[in-house]
Image (tube, grey):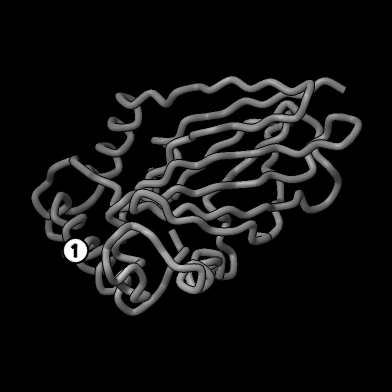
Amino acid sequence: MKLYASCMFKRFKTALLALAILPFVAGAALAHPHIFIITGLGFETDAAGRLTAVSVSWEYDELYSLLVTEDMELDDDYDGKLTPEELARLNGFDQNWDAGFAGDLYIEDAAGQKLRLGGPENLGTSFEDGKITTRHRRGIEGAAATGPWRVKAYDPSYYTAYELGRITLPEGCESRLIAVNLTAAQEALQAELAKIPADVVEMDYPPVGEEFADTLEVSCQK
């Protein structure tokens, strides 16, 4: 995940990645993501029922929210509330994306082709009950896409785990959630870990994020 890259967070990430390497060294197949996000999705279509844009909300877990607010020196009194000035500073903190970052959102059309999504348009940030929630909108680049669509939210490196939350659809559209087969996902992870030599000291985590992602199918009537 390439959302927030302050010096303090980089130090936390380095430490957490070091812990994630331990299963490789020990030969275990246990892995944990370190950031947890509940993702809300809102779909926009044109008069012909073709997809034109997607709005995205990310609700961060309390621990990561705490790391961010401490790093940015927000909520110094730890009351779980931010002043308007603090909220303005926080707004957009996760939308300065590195080049090539896909936004951890992947949409396929009826032909199985991945849609090209534009960069994030900031829709605001909130902070409630110790959790940061950010919102952005992404347009479909090129021609509007004909459905049905298959949608997944995942970090390929599995450093961040995404859970699909509230789904908002235009009139005439419907969705179906296909839950991931966790047994198959764990087996895929174990297979990747088994490829790692026992004497490896440092390496990237296997790109297994998609294996742990639920699939949302969306269709709209013309």
* Quarter location, residue 97: bottom right
**Residue occupying the point 37% across, 75% down:** 72
- The residue wearing badge 1 is 18
Residue type at the position of mark 1: Ala
**Residue occupying the point 71% across, 51% down:** 116
Furthest residue in direction right, as rendered: 47
x, y (%) of residue 16? 22, 61
Specify the quadrant that holds the C terminus: top right
**Residue 158 appears in the picture as rendered:** no
Residue 32, relative to residue 101: is it above or below? above
* Quarter location, residue 213: top left
Residue 109, relative to residue 24: is it above or below? above
**Residue occupying the point 62% across, 25% down:** 217
**Residue occupying the point 12% across, 46% down:** 27
Specify the quadrant that holds the N terminus: bottom left
x, y (%) of residue 144? 83, 42
x, y (%) of residue 194? 22, 42
